[in-house]
Amino acid sequence: METVNIVENVAFNLLKQAVIYLPEDVKQALQKAYAEETSEAGKTQLKAILDNVELAEKYQAPICQDTGTIIFYVKAGAEAKNLDKIEEALIKATRRATVEVPLRPNSVNPFTQKNSGDNTGRLIPYVNWEIVLGDSIELTVMPKGGGSENVCISGMLVPGEGIKGLKKFVVDAVLKAGAKPCPPNILGVGIGGGSDIAMKIAKKALLRPLNVPNSDPEIARLEKEILEAVNMTGIGPMGLGGKTTVLGVNINYAYRHPASYPAAVAFNCWAARRATARIGADRKVEYLTHKVE
């Protein structure tokens, strides 16, 4: 089979896996939140979410009616072949998944307001490229729901305020978002670079599993501090009150200009969908986040 056909089939499988099966680390975080929740309303909402996750797997149906905007992350080995054909393969996989999974059509022309009907259109699915050593291709898909996307925020902080200003920025973002992003949420926090870079790395931070700590101990400690702070808001599951407003905080950063302190918060709803696979030069496929029989 041609590499491009393999990419299309793998991307289709990843889309199906992502929208039906919640990643194990997210499921475990939800189960932990349910066990520790003291608010009756919050516990009821978490039970409904966990039941929903179970039913999605049982009936092979998407865990949320909003199957999101399709975003792919491609780690392409510098020696891999046919890289120029990958984006077309991803588009074909998205069209196929829309019909066969199925996915709700979520791609709308911002000028004509016309829905393409197949989750594709100009720059959608969006593809993030990263060139790495080797000859393999790693694909990750993140179907990003509209509710959580609507409250993503970026801003320019005062450099002199430093980490204290960053903490306030994140807590304020959570308070402003309230129930809109269907909490409990996962937060990707991007710091530095420029305004576009901060949001790009914030969103990419959402791909790190909740049970994988930050490799930098200082940043890991900051993530924990921010997590504790945002959960003190009491917004709770679905905004009805409770201990768990956010399941995890993942921070990513880039060096910044001395005069600028860009920051961004990317929200993901509890249905934090993602799936990853690697395609070797020998065309062998390894699914990294989900079991495939």
Image (cartoon, helix red, strand yellow):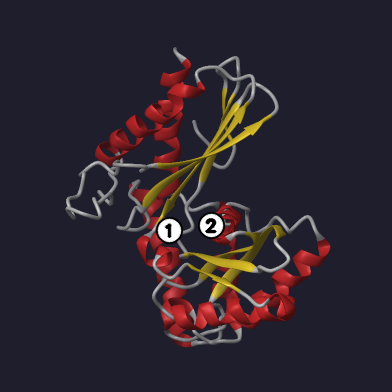
Can the viewer see residue 158 in this picture?
yes
Can the viewer see residue 44 in this picture?
no
Picture coordinates of residue 84, whole percent (x, y): 47, 23
Amino acid carrying mark 1 in the image: Val
Q: Is residue 33 above or below residue 208?
A: below
Q: Quadrant of residue 277?
A: top right
Which label sits on residue 53? 1
Picture coordinates of residue 120, whole percent (x, y): 30, 41
Q: Quadrant of residue 126?
A: top left
- Near mark 1 (Cα within 10 A), the count class, few <14, some 14-19 or many ≥20, is many
Name the N-terminal-most of marks 2 and 1: 1
User: Would residue 83 appear left or right of 215 to someone viewing this image?
Assistant: left
Looking at this view, is 77 or 217 the one in front? 77
x 34%, y 53%: residue: 67
Which label sits on residue 140? none
Check disc 1 and report its element: helix, strand or loop.
Answer: helix
x 24%, y 51%: residue: 108
x 64%, y 19%: residue: 79
User: Would residue 280 appear left or right of 87 to someone viewing this image?
Assistant: right
Residue at the limit of the structure toward the right, as seen here: 217
Q: Which residue is mark 2?
A: 196
x 78%, y 55%: residue: 215
Picture coordinates of residue 140, whole percent (x, y): 52, 40
